[in-house]
Image: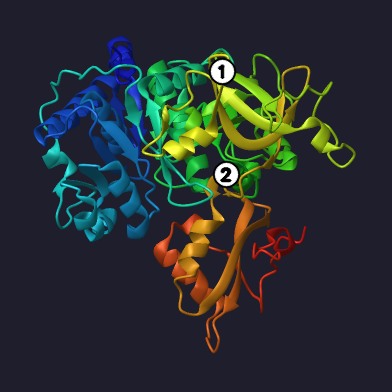
Amino acid sequence: MVNLVNSVATAVDEYDDDTAVGFRGEELSYRELWGQIGAFASGLAEAGVEPGDRVGIYLPNLPQFVVGFHGTLRAGGVVVPMNPQYKAREIEHLLSDSSADVVVALADLAPFVEEVREETGVEHLVTVGGEAEGGVTFEEFCGSPDFDTVERDGDDVACQPYTSGTTGQPKGVLLTHENLRSNAEVARTLPAGGLRPDDKLLGVLPLFHIYGMTVVMNATLFAGGSYYPLPSWDAQESMDLIESAELTMMQGVPAMYNDIINQPDVEDRHLSSLRMCGVGGAGIPVEVLRRFEELFDVKVYEGYGLTETSPVTHFNSPDEGRRIGSIGRTLPGVESMIVTPEFEEVPPVERGPVDEDETELDDITGELVVAGPNVMKGYHNRPEANESVFTEVDGTRWFHTGDIGYHDEDGFYYVVDREKHMIVTGGYNVYPREVEELLFEHEAVADVAVVGIPDDRRGETVKAFVVKAPGAEVTADEIRQFCLDNLAEYKHPREVAFVDELPRTTTGKVQKFELRGE
């Protein structure tokens, strides 16, 4: 029997009065954190939450997210992390699909929960940062700090984050206690010499996302380090915190590093306390990586992972060297291959990265597949999707990442394209169909196609090509605002182009490569 929260309990026994969480000048010791986790677990039990019940956490990076996450596990529940940028129409599916009984929400976001409460069956709304209609405050909800941890099997689901698909609604990813435990333990080994109790990590990656959840929050707490969350990304605030608290590590997406190096006062900043930085979510431009390293004399290491793999599968380890442009080597305990559509292994190149302009990529690339204790149990209530993403060979269950790449004889892997038609913007995945379906609801839109286009800061950004309905009058700003009113900010099309018709094949399929100018 194992519960992921036991890893926090072990740290409490060893580090007791040391700082677990630091937030805006206040510090929470490991002993205090454990008491708050127990109090929230007590509140859940009193609310009728039983082992396996879902609890939604609809918060930015706050200490209450840490407490709510581990308190849910301690009560035997399953965490359903929810993007605080989501609006009512987006959280309705998450709450309905997961059957969450309790939702912990920022008071400002509580109205969105109330708006869909009747349709979703949410019984308890717990608010953070103030009161809200239909809810009870976080402090009022919590009970006694003394609570016996509900033990769970390693194969029991601990967390159910949602990831968008190329078609249909977002899918719930079933991550078990063992999935998350094994990946957090490996993440602890990624910095040179491993994560240490005196390490202090910048918590700017969103906790609803598996990257921030596992690699930053959990890995830090399991190692006895200190986690410093920030509710939203701001380059100046992040640099201020690194300097004032003397943080030792930063994990981020490429846009964050790009923002920092483009700050007007960057030359006057002193981030010498950083001993390592990591980047994931998308490929970082080499120029950005090198400029950041030159400014602050700290190495930035690239990695790779997915929600379905808890997340990390590859990393450029400081202890084993790195190769710029590579996602790194396969992590210990994880297996990976590059395979053809017939699931035949593609041989490695001698040494990467190759010159993609002078190499016939079709000869050296294939789909990246992975296996290991970090790979999800499956998608929630999606048997067809599970059948399509797993291949079992000789007793090994391989997960299809949908990413196309190659590897070299030194064991480094390289991703060159995404098989799925998603847009990766600032580390977030946006699936065009979701935006298209919304725009089709606009009375002025007759036809629409959404694609990703290059963006220096975000890697890619969303662009909508709109065919107006006959006689309709609508502006690009109105289209953008319509999306902002109904979708998370990062999903809205920053560029809108009006066209007379969309390029289509004879079977009616939109030729998006023409829209992208390929």
Q: Amino acid at mark 1?
A: Val
Q: Amino acid at mark 2?
A: Met
Please tell me in which quadrant of the rendered image residue 70 appears: top left
Question: Callout 1: helix, strand or loop?
Answer: loop
Question: Extreme bottom residue here?
Answer: 471
Question: Extreme front residue here?
Answer: 507
Q: Are marks 2 and 1 in contact (CB under 8 Å)?
A: no
**Residue at x 44%, y 56% (from the top left corner):** 488
Please tell me in which quadrant of the rendered image residue 19 appears: top left
**Residue at x 64%, y 19% (from the top left corner):** 317
Query: Which one is closest to the eye, mark 2 or mark 1?
Result: 1
Q: Which mark is residue 383?
A: none
141 displayed left or right of 368: left
Please tell me in which quadrant of the rendered image residue 298 appears: top right
321 displayed left or right of 254: right
Question: Extreme right residue here?
Answer: 358
Q: Please, is residue 276 above or below residue 87 in the view?
A: above
The residue that disc 1 covers is 334
User: How far apart in space, not on screen, are marks 2 and 1 (Cα)?
Assistant: 28 Å
Near-viewer residue (468 or 423): 468
Q: Please, is residue 448 above or below residue 383 in the view?
A: below
**Residue at x 69%, y 66% (from the top left corner):** 504
Q: Residue 164: where, in percent of width, then height?
A: 48, 47
Near-viewer residue (444 or 22): 444
Classify 10 Å Cα crowding around label 2: few (below 14), some (14-19), many (20 and above): many
Position of the N terminus by quadrant: top left
Near-viewer residue (105 or 102): 102
Position of the C terminus by quadrant: bottom right
Q: Please, is residue 84 above or below residue 472 in the view?
A: above
The residue that disc 2 covers is 256
**Residue at x 54%, y 13% (from the top left corner):** 333
